[in-house]
Structures are given as structure tokens and as C-alpha cells.
Image (cartoon, grey):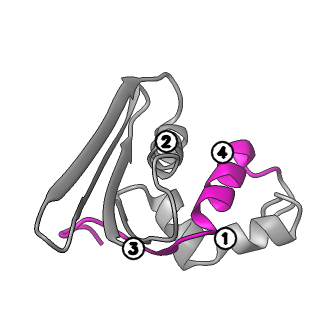
Amino acid sequence: MSYTININVYGSAHAYHYDMNFKEPNGKEHRMQGEEPREATANGNALFALTEALKHISGHQMLNIITDNQQIYMAFHEGWLVSWKKNGWKTARGKDVRNAGEWKNVDMLISRHSYRVNYPAGNS
């Protein structure tokens, strides 16, 4: 069965966090959270949170990904992820993409799903 799964992902320099939820047609709600201390950049931890959340989703689902992380948002909305792949995981300036291994994981895990990526309400 296919569901719309809401995924909130956040990262700081010291931890990552994700919160996922969806409702079955009968109204039963399911929720899963993950949070751990992890020393990395805020971008690295937000990306790690997204990867960890995606690992728990099977089948083809509609994902509503909400993040305040600008790099994740822009990677999808501005086509950075597609360009990085096309350019051998190099940026438009020819530099290596930071966290390329994690981005490759996200690309592989998200490819079987439909998705949209948004900022939380109130962010611009």
C-alpha cells in the first residue's frame, strides 16, 4: 500500500534528528523518530538524518520532506543533485561535492519514491 509520509529532518554540528509519520486509511497513525549525538557539520548531520529516515521506508511512497537545511532544499529545488551526478559529483566550480557519499545514498534511497522538499512553515 502507498502512503504519504511526512519526514522532518534537522541537523546541528552536534546531532541529527528525523521525525516521520503517516496515517493509514483507517486513521491509525504511525510515527518514527531518530536522534543521536554526532559530530559533523549542520549540513552533514541534516543529510545523515535524511539518509537514516529513508532507510526505513519500503515500497513506493509519496514523501513530504520538510527541512530547514538550505543545502538539502536547494539540492532538490535548484537541480544541484542532478547536476552533481551528471558532473561526476563535482560542483559547478569543479570542486568535489561535500558529503558526496551521503548524497549518493540519498539519491539511491529516494529514487524509488515520489517526493517534494519544503521549508517548514514560516521559513523563507
Spatial separation of the CA atoms under disc 4 and disc 3: 26 Å
Q: Nearer the viewer, mark 1 or mark 4?
A: 4
Spatial separation of the CA atoms under disc 3 and disc 1: 28 Å
Compare marks 1 and 4 and give the one earlier in the sequence: 1
Spatial separation of the CA atoms under disc 2 and disc 3: 20 Å
| Quadrant in the picture for the N terminus | bottom left
The disc label shown at residue 52, or none: 2
Q: Residues within 10 Å of mark 1 (few under 14, many from 20)?
A: some
The disc label shown at residue 102, or none: 4
Spatial separation of the CA atoms under disc 1 and disc 4: 14 Å
Compare marks 4 and 3 and give the one earlier in the sequence: 3
Above or below, comparing residue 92 to residue 42 in the picture: below
Q: Are marks 1 and 4 in contact (CB under 8 Å)?
A: no
Q: Residue, x 66% and y 61% (percent of image)?
A: 107
Give, as a three-letter code, the residue at label 3. Ser
| Quadrant in the picture for the C terminus | bottom left
The disc label shown at residue 54, or none: none
Q: Residues within 10 Å of mark 3 (few under 14, many from 20)?
A: few
Horizontal side, residue 98 vs residue 66: left or right: right
Compare marks 2 and 1 and give the one earlier in the sequence: 2
Q: Which residues are magenta?
A: 96-124
Residue tagged 3: 2
Q: Quadrant of residue 75?
A: bottom right
Above or below, comparing residue 116 to residue 93 in the picture: below
Q: Residue, x 51% and y 71% (percent of image)?
A: 60
Give, as a three-letter code, the residue at label 2. Glu
Residue tagged 1: 80
Q: Nearer the viewer, mark 4 or mark 3?
A: 3
Give, as a three-letter code, the residue at label 4. Glu
